Structures are given as structure tokens and as C-alpha cells.
Amino acid sequence: MQTPVNEFLARSFGLSGEEYDRVLAIMGRTPTFTELGIFSVMWSEHCSYKSSRVWLKQLPTKAPWVIHGPGENAGVVDIGDGLAAIFKMESHNHPSFIEPYQGAATGVGGILRDVFTMGARPIANLNALRFGRPENPRTKRVVDGVVRGIGGYGNCVGVPTVGGEVNFHASYDGNPLVNAMTVGIARKDRIFLSAAAGIGNPVVYVGSKTGRDGIHGATMASTEFSADSEDKRPTVQVGDPFTEKLLIEACLELMATDAIVGIQDMGAAGLTSSAVEMAGKGGVGIDLDLDQVPARETGMTAYEFMLSESQERMLMVLRPDREQVARDIFQKWDLDFAVVGRITDTGRITVCHHGTVEADIPLAPLNDQAPLYTRPTVDTPKQEKLNPARIEDRFGLAKALEKLIACPDLCSRAWVWDQYDSTVGGQTVKRPGAADAAVVKLEGLKRAVALTTDCTPRYCMADPELGGAQAVAEAWRNLTAVGARPLAITDNMNFGNPEKPEIMGQFAAAIRGMVAACEALDFPVVSGNVSLYNETEGRGILPTPAIGGLGVMDDASLAVGLALPPWLDIVLIGNTVGWLGQSLWLREVAGREDGAPPPVDLGVERANGDFVRTHILNRTIRACHDVSDGGILVALAEMAMAGGVGARLMTHPNNVPGHAFWFGEDQGRYIIAVPDYVAFARAAEAAGVPAMRLGTSGGQDLTLPDGGSISVAALREAHERFFPSWMNNNPQKETP
Amino acid sequence: MKAGIVIFPGINRERDMAIALQTSFGTVPRMIWHKDTDLAGLDLVVIPGGFSFGDYLRCGAMAAHSPIMRAVKQHAERGGYVLGVCNGFQILTEAGILPGALLRNASLRFLSMDCHLRVERADTVFTNQYQAGQTFRAVMAHGDGNYFADSDTLDRLEAERLVAFRYATKASEVTPEVNLNGSARSIAGIFSPNLRVLGLMPHPEDMVDPLMGGTDGKPLFDALAAA
């Protein structure tokens, strides 16, 4: 006996009463259990973007180099030499809290599929990770599992993990963020899209068998967490990177033929969303015969088949005369290959199981009449601008620096990235920690892509509009700092419960800031993902619009890193007023988390960045690092540690208090090393870009202008202490 | 010398290896599918790194039973050259072509970083472009690189001078601190008794281009190309 279908059941599937009424109107009858399941996942926040769509539409998505913007499996940009970069970032936050290893692993697997489904060979992964306070006993278990999961999956599929970020904050205690990004490369005339076409064409299922795992995962990702979230562990999928690797190779082999009409991976909402989206985009209908779907277990219902989120599965529409070619390729790779349906001209999806029609839904209204909400918003109140002269410096430079570079948010991430294979493929020019952006060369060419992920959630909390702009600007800056030409971004919008006006206000404001920055920097959004309801027990995360940026370098050999070479002039590009509001110095040293965050002047950002890039590419600049968290002195210390070289610093200008000058987080700045400051300053002046000499590199110590001094070895010791000492006490023994 | 690379499902460093071989040999290596059985015409058979069959069983255990491995064994017995790197080394030990086994790293974590290898002898076809006692840099990227063998086997390897490389400091000192995966006697690679089969964990093939961090691994491939 199946549960009766009614509004009560609809609510338990996550649909509102009003949404259920809409289902009834579309169907003209009570839907079947399976149909209700299909509606509920397609109309979940995760799949329908019902709360965010009105805002996302404002993002700039076009540029001459954009081939496909949002709406496809991933964004596609022209990078020259007849090639396209295909990339996207996606969250796996909720699963990663419930089951850190598998949650993170399947996050990597899912984003890889979004990219290779378009015909690209994945060449790099990045991860933007945000965890709770290290003091929280749960955090350690989550960090350990997430890092192992990312490594376990990425290392096995053989795609180098080349970059990302790790932050800690109490607001992520019950809701860590795992945002995974993949970048792939394809010939730009060989991009595969998902739209189905060709009445009668076979619909083919390939990859792993379907099991009962992950049923209603998309719905889980669309609600807040509570103490009983542990009960949702069965909604987390289990990853199989070996099968993924076979799928990559088999799909790319098939894509070299002309067999594929349309192809899409089965991600959130599995077979349902892939079938509905492929047929919907093609304006055709689709008949599915579930008896043909390879099943991992017996006795599965139509509902379970349609909603399963078993991993490593793809759906394709093939040319009928190429079915055998495709079958042979998948057989070679020992992967399941099954014709599970046909394309029809009905405009409907019909699902047949054991001779019974279990679902028969018109596609147009399922897609077009998906709910769309303009939810109420409340603006975040502005914070007061802090006067640095009124904030006492009780530590001095050396002590504050040592404290900052040792703190969890600024310490070395080597413990994390040492567990990720960053070199497989043999094309990694700048590995994690070597430069502001990862640089990965294209096999057999001089060309390279530069990649970064960025967001400063504490700025976003204090001023979401500014924070949104800052995240985009910092990604642009990091790409610029290696010498790359920034092309486009993917965004991963992580926010709390959108039904709360203050949260929706954060979202709307962050989008406004991003729009401004994307436009000013010619840096459009080509793909993205929204993760809402990041709350546990009613407590929301810091608003976190994580930005994944991609740039291109015509010649990989021109890329610069942040390692400071000896005996060069150290120069600061950009203006410094000594902005301490929301700075890490303020939080870690002065013990305050307040004030307005540093403003971002997008015109200045662009001018400074374009100048820096020009002088990297003409080989004047030998090392470059943007100034971000922790300000000038932290950036300099990072350069010194990377290069194993000290520096002697000059006195700061007397119109800014010392601690504010050295630790303020004014935006749009870079520290660079050049052989000849005088000549360089002349060029900067001609370009209208502020350049100030900070000192000279060399020796084994960082000699500070207030008389203090700290050896590079001591800096390193402090910088590298946190992660190993925290994590290498067996995390398994942690009491939950 | 003609080279071929064996591809098992799940192998993922075959492209890196092909680039390294091509750089030194000037010719494109032949790619050999694991279900093939023919290695005719090849002088050097390379088993690259990766996760053959996902390494869901013991690393390399499944691959060691693939059809091609019979041919690899015969090739080695005939005195042909074999190079196994990382998963390739694991597969060679699982197939019994080289002694010992590769256990989980002592830290129980994957290790991805540069390491220095001390060249234990320079009178082999793999190492004759290095100096005995010198170190070179290579990329380490493995979860199971902890070389293990019983003490008799280790003593025999030492006595017959079959240890190819040991983990060392840049200054050629073999210390526990740089033996990150916990290998017995810091062994990173070993030869067969005829010195024609080499298995090692770190990746010289990822160190053949100054852009990617250096060319320390190139002499190994240059030496093979000149043989």
C-alpha cells in the first residue's frame, strides 16, 4: 500500500500548500506518488532557484569571450588557440556536515561531471572550504573528513587539486561550507550541450548502477538543519572515483565521435532532473522505461529510481545509427550502458515501470511554472567607520605579526594541500601556496589558465554589498597578481534561510556588489550555484558568496609567484589609509570584530591591476602578492617565507598610524619586487598608479621599521604550527 | 630504445609519463591497454602511476592479474627493461616481479610534495646520468608508499646493491625526518637483480620541465633514451 497523495504528503516532500495547488492545476488530477516526487525535487530550492532567480538575473553574463553563460552544466569561455575553458563551482555543504568524507568526495565528483559532460577534460580542481571554530570538538572531525574526502576522490580520478581557501568561523560550527570547483579544457568547436533532439532517438544511461542512496538529497539541501540531521545520513551519496575516472575516459572517447546529440550528468535529483532538463531544453518529450535502468538492488520503486542520487551516472541522447559505437566504448571501460527511453514529440515525460505508467507530466509547465519568489528583504545596517588613531596598539609590529601569521585563518595550509595531488597531469606551473592564483599549463602549448577562489565572509557580514564586490575584485586581483588576464567567474552563493528578510537582504546586496564589480572589471559570471538554508538551529552562516575566478596567460613561463627573491626593491602598489575595520589585526590582536569593512574603488582596482599585469608580462616584476587578510606586513611575511629570504623595511608614512599602515586591509593593493624602484616608480607615476617603496629584500630576517626583527625561520615555525599540532592528535578518538 | 606505457583502468599519470618519455626519446611511446597481451618490439615497458581499479583492494593487487602482466613478466624475464612508478611500483611488487610491498604511509595520510632521492648507484641503465650519492628532486604523490620487506629480503637488497634510491635531505643525508612515508631503510626504489627492472614511488616524470618545478627527473629518461 502506498501512502495516499495529498497536501500533507506534499508538505513532507518540501512543497508548500500553494505549490501543491499549482501541481494539481498543472496535472488536472491528483498526481501519483512518483509524480509528486518529481515535482517536489524539480521545485526544490536546490533545483529551481526559486528564491534566488530574480536576483541572479541581474548578474552580467556576457563578454566577447563568453561562449556559454549560466544555464548550461558549466560556463564556457574562449581562451584562444581554438580552445575553451569550461568551469563551475558547486556546494556540497549539507552532506559534508552529515558525512564529511563522502559529502566532500561526492561534491568533487559532481562538479567534475558538470564539466566533462560538456566535452572537457578536467585539468584542475579547487576547493573553497569554511569550517567552524577550531575549539569546537566537531570541527576537527569535519576538517579531517572533508580534506580526506577531497583528496580521496580528486587524487584517484587524477585531476590535480591546485588551489582554494580555508577559513574558520563560529557561524560555520554546525554548517561547514564545501564549495568545489572544476576547470576543464575542450576544443571550442566541440562543446556538448544537454538539449535533447531527434524524435525517436535513444536515451542512454551510462555509468554506475542506481541504488537507493541520496533519495531526496536536493530537498535536504533546501531546508535548515536541526539536531536530528544525523538521521539524514542515508540521503548522503557514496562516491566511487574509480568509476568516475572510467566515465571521464569513456565519455571523452565517445565525444571524439559524432554519436552524441545531448548529454547531461545525473546530479541533484538524479534521473528526474537530467531527463526533465534535457527534454525541456530541447522542447521535446521523453519516455523512460525504468525496467531498463541498471539497478544496484532489487525491489526499487519508480519513485526511488527517479529520485535516487546515486553517483557517477550520465544520461545521453544518441544518434540511432551510432548506438553500437557508443555501446562498444562503454563496454571497453566496463561501464553499464542501457537504452532506457526514447525522445518523443509529446512534450511530456512519461515514466513506465513494470508495465505501469508511474508518471506522465507535461514538461513545459513543470519547467515554466516552477515557483519564483521575490522574497522580502531587509538591508543590513551599515557599520561605523573606525578611526585607526583611536585604536590602541599594545603589541608592536613583530608580536602582532607573529600572532597573525600563526592564527587559524592565516597560518600555513600545507597540512591541507599536502594531502591533495597537485601535480598529476604534469602541467601545474604554480602549485598551492606558490602564487596568488594556481597556474596550470595546457598540454603541448605555451598557454595556461590561472585559477583562484575568493571571498571574505566577515566583510560580507558587515556590508554584504561591499563584500560581494570585494570577493569579485579579490578574485580579479589574484589572477592579475600572477600575470593572467582575468576572463570570467563562477559564483557559489552560500547564505542562510531566504525566508528571513535579513538573509534575503544580504543575498540581494551581495548580488548588487557583484554586479558592480563584474561590470567594472569586465569579469562576467558564466556559471554558479546557490546554497541557501545554511543554518543550524536557527543560526545562519556568514554570508559567503564564494567566487571562482579564471584567467588566461598566453605564455605560462611569464607567470610570477609570491616567493621573494633576494636583493630587490619591495614596492607597494595602491593607496593606504590604514583601514582597520573588520581587519584580522582587529580581530586577532585587538579582540574586536567591528567597523565598516574596507571600501573597494573599482576604477582604482582596475587601474592598479592593469598596471601590475603589464609589468609582470614585460618581466619587470619578479614577485607579486596581493595585499588582503592581515595587510601589508602579513603579505610581506608570506613572500619572505615562500622565498626563504628576509627584508629590511623602511618607516611608514607619518600620516598613518604604524599598526594601521602595516596591518590595515585597504583594497586594490599589491606588493611587488622589482630590480629598480626609481625606474618603476616613474612608470607608475606616468600611469597614475600609486607606488611606494617599502624596503629591500635579502638576508635571513624581516627587519621592521620600529626596530623589531624576526627571522624568516621563526616566521615559518609560527606559520606552520597550527594545523599539524591541531590535527595530528588522532581525530578518530575525538568524543563526539 | 622503444618504449610503451601500460594503461590499466584507473591509471592517471600516463600522460605525464608519455611527455617525459617523448621529451627524452623524441618519439611518442606506444600506449598498451591492459587487456592486450603483446609487447613485441618494445625495449622498455613502463607502468605509470594512478589508482588501477581504484585501488579499492590492496594497491596494485587487481592490476597484477590483468592479462598484460603475463607479458610484462616474460618481458622482464627475457631481460627487457621495465620501469614502474608509484602505482606501477606497487603493481610490480604485487606481481612478484620485484620483492616487498608498499604499505599505507606511516602518517596514514596521502603525501603530495617534493622529496629528494639519493642515488644509491649510478652504474645502471636508469641512473647512469646521475652521480652515485647525489640527490635529485622528485614529486611524491601517494597514500601507500611505505616500502616493506622482511629483514632477510632487505639485507639481500642491500648486499646485492639493489636499492636504487633512498629518501634523503637535499644534502644527501638519509634521516628519519625526510622518510615521510615510513619506508623500511628509507627505500624509495629498488632494482631487479639484473638491474633492468626499476620500481620507485616518487615521480621523476613530473620533474622534466623547468616550468613545472625543475628538470631533476630528466636524467633518468635521458639515460634510458641513450641506452
Image (tube, rainbow, N blue to C red):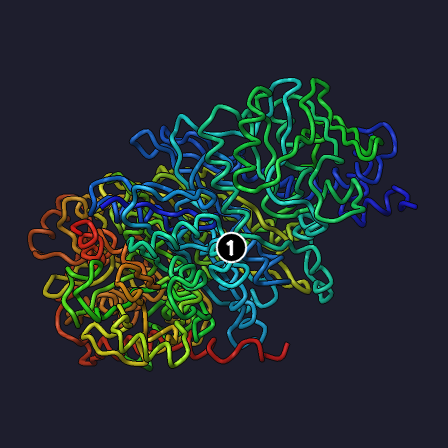
What residue is rendered at 47% in x and 72% in y?
A: B108
Disc 1 sits on a residue from what chain? B
Left/right placement of residue A396 relative to residue A466 reads left
Where is residue A225? Give x, y as percent: 68, 60
Disc 1 marks which residue? B54
Three-letter amino acid code at the position of disc 1? Gly
Q: Viewer-proximal residue, A178 or A498? A: A178
- In the foreground, B55 or A534: B55
Which residue: 42% across, 54% down? B50
Residue A549 or residue B4, whichever sits in front: B4
Residue A401 visible, this angle: no
- Residue situated furthest right in the rendering: A1
Give the residue furthest to the front. B78
Q: Is A278 on the left or on the right of A593, as rendered?
A: right
Q: Is residue B109 visible?
A: yes
The reply, left or right, for residue B70 in relation to residue A736 is: left
Crowd class of label 1 (few under 14; some 14 to 19; many from 20; radius 10 Å): many
How many numbered dots are placed on residues in this image? 1
In the figure, residue B111 lies in which quadrant? bottom left
Residue B155: x %, y % from top left: 32, 80
A646 and A124: which one is in front? Answer: A124
Rendering coords of residue A434 (x, y %):
29, 59
Residue B8 percent location from the top left of the image: 45, 48
* Secondary-structure class at tag 1: helix
**Seen in the image, is A262 located left or right of residue B198?**
right
- Image point 21% across, 45% down: which residue? B25
